[in-house]
Image (tube, rainbow, N blue to C red):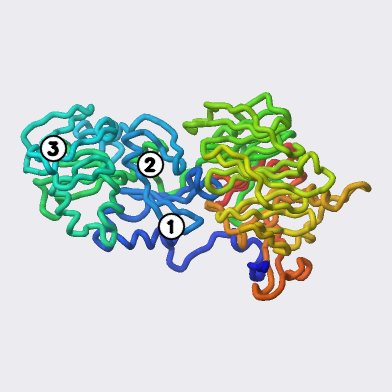
Amino acid sequence: MKWVIFLALGVLVGVSFLPVEATQPTPFADPSFSRFFAQAGASGQKLLWGGAPLVSLVEPYADAAGSRRLVQYFDRGRMELDAATGTVTQGLLVRELTSGAVQVGDDAFTQRSPANIPIMATSANAGQDAGPTYADFAVAALSRSPNRTVSPDGVLDDWLLPGGKVLTGPVPVVAIAAVYIDVTGHNVPDVFAAWFATEPFGTLSWQQALGYPVSEAYWVQADGADHLVQLFERRVVVYTPRAASSEQFAVTNVGRHYYRWRYGDEPGEEQRRLVAEPAADVSADLVAPLGYSASVVLTNVTDITDLAIGPDSRVLIAHASGTISALAPGAGAEVPLVSGLQNPVAVASVGSTIYVVDSAGLHRFEDLDADGIIDVSHPPIALPFDPATVIAAPGPNECLYIGGVEATHARSGFATVMRWDAVTEQLDLVPVTFSANAAFVLDVSGSIWAADADGELVRFTLNELTRGVLSLQGIAAPTPTADAARGATLVRAIRDLLLYRPDGTIGDPLRDMLALVSDADGGRLVRLQPAAADASAAATPASDLAGSIVDFVTGFRDPVAVVAGLDGSLYVADDGRAVLYRITPQ
């Protein structure tokens, strides 16, 4: 039996998009982060995290909803949120710092040089006496060691010097290999094992808090003292035998080190902007909600067909003339990426891959190191669609969803959806068919939401198509020509759908769905508020639903595409004014 899933929302205009002032402000970007922080206990919180959060931002991640996820950095680590499940994970920051492989998906990495940052550094201005760097540990972290817990040679007396050279010599105190971790091939010394037994990380085990060891324990000299140091996947543990008993064990500032290595600066009080700044502070003829500002970032652009966010976090722009370009940060200009295409109608990015659909089919361009330069180009894959009808949207698990009208069934007016799986490199038919749609989007669960030509917002999930989610009759389409069908009118009216939150994360379709509309007044962004009857009752006709359509940004002349940046900015291409707008939450 079909089920109906939504309650009437009856919310004031734009209210969910306005800044919310909490009665007790929290530094945590999400309540899940706060709960995870509490697991370390009062004493473990300072040890494990170093204090309050430093900065939160949205980072590209191929296997997260919309290929992005919310993260929060601390002095001594990073928390990551899986929006689909609410699960919090911790970054394997030390593994990345020593290997240079930045993880941008479950099995996707971009490569850079290991971090030349002293592991004991407490500031960006660490001196010559700060000891070895993460790069100095790179060789040690890439090799396995024998099990020394069953060997007479169990005493740990190796010193690691700046530059990565290892020497054997006298040690301040005797440390013996006590536990061998076969997963990574490294020995944990007895002094660390004894400390772990005291449960210093609250309810988190040492494996949960630190990960597995990625190096042996080495003696190092830093800041005039001798330390026994071992690198684990998530954190670095330091034992200083000459220190006071309460200060002998410490965890280094790996979160701050990682942020400096990846982004080139120190985490500040405000969220880092990962997108282009406006070319000029031009006040647009737009009406936006309180707390948002509008500006123009590009002018004299008349052939934009689609927008996306690329692997390097820049805005990708598809031009009907056959090129894909990226918006250059701070320059108010475009940087060419791909040329020679045949009227590209859709562009999307999943992980390190940029997908483009044109008259030749589905193209794949790999930006393996997220530097804004195409490293690999693949031949196009044929699609069964009439190119003029194609739209594309990224989905979970490194998949791209492509919708359109099959060329051999153009008169039917029914849209077909296909899924490209980047892991298996297979193009599969999705078992859903509905009236030719203007746009669709996927939520964190993988459900497809589409603006249907029958004048409804529909949802397809678990092999069931739920109609009547929201009537779209309140969206006024341009006056149709004499021979235009009702479906074609709606296609002209709704140009794009997206799930949007001001923090840059993927929104909830019940509260955060926006539609880009080209209507008789020019164009606008509207908020769709789905609603439905009691789930136990029969499906309610769309005309009887209490859902609503609320203006969010108005004043466009002929908008053709919209995308949300990782910092929460909205980019709208307006063909009528030949500009690209940026709408920024303050």
Q: For the residues carrying marks 3 and 2, which lies nearer the camera in this image? A: 2
Tag 2 residue: 259
Q: Is residue 572 visible?
A: no
User: Which secondary structure lies at badge 3?
Assistant: loop
- Residues packed near mark 3 inside 10 Å, few (<14), some (14 to 19) or many (20 plus): few
Amino acid at dot 3: Gly
Q: Quadrant of residue 180?
A: top left
Report x, y in % for residue 490. 80, 52
Question: What's the residue type where badge 2 is placed?
Answer: Tyr
Residue in the picture at 7% in, 43% down? 174
Which labelled disc corresponds to residue 14?
Answer: none
Tell which circle, 1 or 2, labels the residue nearer the N-terminal end. 1
Q: Position of residue 576 (x, y in %)?
A: 77, 40
Q: Measuring 67% from the left and 28% from the top, which residue is drawn there?
A: 323
Q: Earlier in the sequence, mark 1 or mark 3?
A: 1
Q: Nearer the viewer, residue 332 or 186?
A: 186
3D distance between C-alphas at marks 3 and 2 = 27 Å
- Indicate the position of residue 345 as horizontal and vertical percent values: 71, 37
Choose between 273 and 377: the one closer to the eye. 377
Name the residue that disc number 1 marks: 87
Residue drawn at point x = 46 percent, y = 44 percent: 272
Say if mark 1 contacts mark 3, CB within 8 Å. Answer: no
Residue for badge 3: 224
Q: Can you tell which of label 1 and label 2 is closer to the viewer? A: 1
Q: Is disc 1 placed on a helix, strand or loop?
A: strand
The span from disc 1 to disc 2 (Cα, nearest Å) is 22 Å
